[in-house]
Image (cartoon, coloured by chain):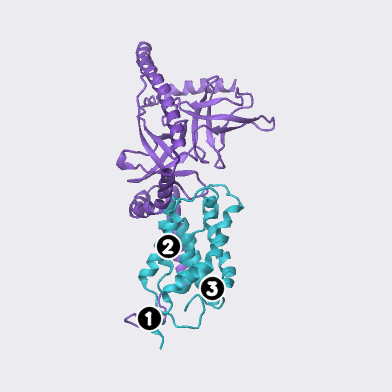
Chain colours: A purple, B cyan
Amino acid sequence: MESAPPPFFRTGPSPLARLFIFTILALVLLGTDARLRYLETVRQIVSVVIYPLQRIAGAPLSIATRVSDFFTTQSSLQTENAKLSQQTLTQSAQLQQLALLQTENEHLRKLLGARERLKSRSSFAEVLYAARDPFSRRVWIDKGSQEEVQPGQPVIDGNGVVGQVTRVMPWLSEVTLITDKGHLVPVLNTRNGVRAVLGGTGSGDTLELKFVPLNADFEVGDQLVTSGIDGVYPPGLPVAQIVNIERNAAFIFARILCKPLAGVSSHRQVLVVHAERKIPERPAEEEPKKAAPAKKGRRGGAGA
Amino acid sequence: MDVVARHEILLPVKPGFIVATLTGAVLLNMMPWTGWMAWLRPDFVALVVLYWVIDQPRRVGFMVAFLLGLLVDVAEGALLGQHALSYTILTYAGIALARRVRMFSPAAQMVHVIPLFLLNDVVVIGIRMLAGADFPGYRYYISGIVAGALWPLVALLLRLPQRPRENDHG
């Protein structure tokens, strides 16, 4: 029982006044979080507090998965084992060739004077759950800043690119999938070397090639790999395959829909690539006197 | 002062019980729902907060709803303040309708409560659309209706510790 009688008359601001105060506070927080980045530390602190709750909440599903894994039949394990050892055999043969090709590549690049390719290492992570926000395609993985995961690192699985790390907490990271609406990947068509930009649509598992003119050389079935010119995704990783092309003369750009090659929304095991990319510095701006005749020349060239 | 209007004297609510139910609601919100259940999943925190705002307005008010909204925002990776704002509006609607809602049976309270949860969803979607997202489709509102459908169950469950013990009679 309470020791003091409850306050019978509510003092303080009326509910409507409180509504206004808290609404304004919430709007200020929203504006700050949407435009500026000051609230990241607040978010980190709160996420450390709720991390045990997140693990507890995810426990039933992981326990259920483990229990159902425990009860697999021996015959299915045997077939999976046979398939995996066959895969390992073919892949180790390919790896032996890869080492040879890498040394040859380095040698050739030195001969040409080209910058050498940087090797990257990757770490294994597991997808915990998808972010509940229905507007964005993001998932959480179980490696965080304690395991040297940094924002911007690409995340891949066995078949291709899955996404990019966007937010890093001490023990968890948030990965934005390539199917997210605002996410863009610069890609290269393996058939003819044409470059384009692949963006997510936010709906289902479709990706769309953006800003592709009507007469560009793309066909259904083309494989798209990362071109590496953004400095984020290492070049040569498979991303998607074209499934549908619409060329309508009423629009400036063709509408090209693609299907991602990686199991973007299904696979649970992914690799985080700790790629160190060094891009050469931008050349310094020329002085205005020298730039003026150059600008005129450029304008003439553009107008012609 | 109780949600389910019965004619019996109830034990007072322990604050620990309120904290436990709110924590349980946050845990349920954070569980990894996949596939079609991700659309059906109601906002458990909104459900429990609205119950306590109507039942214990002195203990659970705007401040608790606001802080829980911030917690849910960080857990879901949403903009900070999105759910804080929607829970604040939900709390105000709960306070405004509390005396009326208490007069009805739990089943009839569902009718009052479903629009409040839909309003909660509308505020969340509105903020995201202002921040530049697309409309996710009308099936997003199913979770609000599911939350309203769960209301009688929640009301009865959360009232259980308040029922008098047998040996208290006479």
- The crowding category of the residue bearing disc 1, from other C-alpha atoms within 10 Å (few below 14, some 14 to 19, many at least 20), is few
Disc 3 and disc 1: Cα gap in Å? 22 Å
Which quadrant of the figure has residue A222? top right
* SS at badge 1: loop
**Residue A219 picture location, percent across and down:** 61, 24
Determine the chain carrying the residue at label 3.
B
Residue nearest the viewer, comparing B159 with A178: B159
Disc 1 and disc 2: Cα gap in Å? 24 Å
| Marks 1,2: beta carbons within 8 A | no
**Residue A283 picture location, percent across and down:** 39, 24
Q: Considering the image in quadrants, where does the C terminus of chain A appear?
A: top right
Mark 1 is on which residue type? Pro
Rendered position, A161 above or below A17: above
Mark 2 is on which residue type? Phe
Rendered position, A46 above or below A216: below
Q: Which mark is residue B97?
A: 3
Looking at the image, residue A48 sits to the left or right of residue A256; the answer is: left
Visible in this render: residue A16?
A: no
The residue under the point 58% across, 57% down is: B142
* SS at badge 3: helix
Rendered position, A111 above or below A90: above
Q: Which mark is residue A6?
A: 1
Mark 3 is on which residue type? Leu
How many discs appear?
Answer: 3
Question: Which residue is tagged 2?
Answer: B66
* SS at badge 2: helix
Looking at the image, residue A34 sits to the left or right of residue A274; the answer is: right
Visible in this render: residue B35?
A: yes
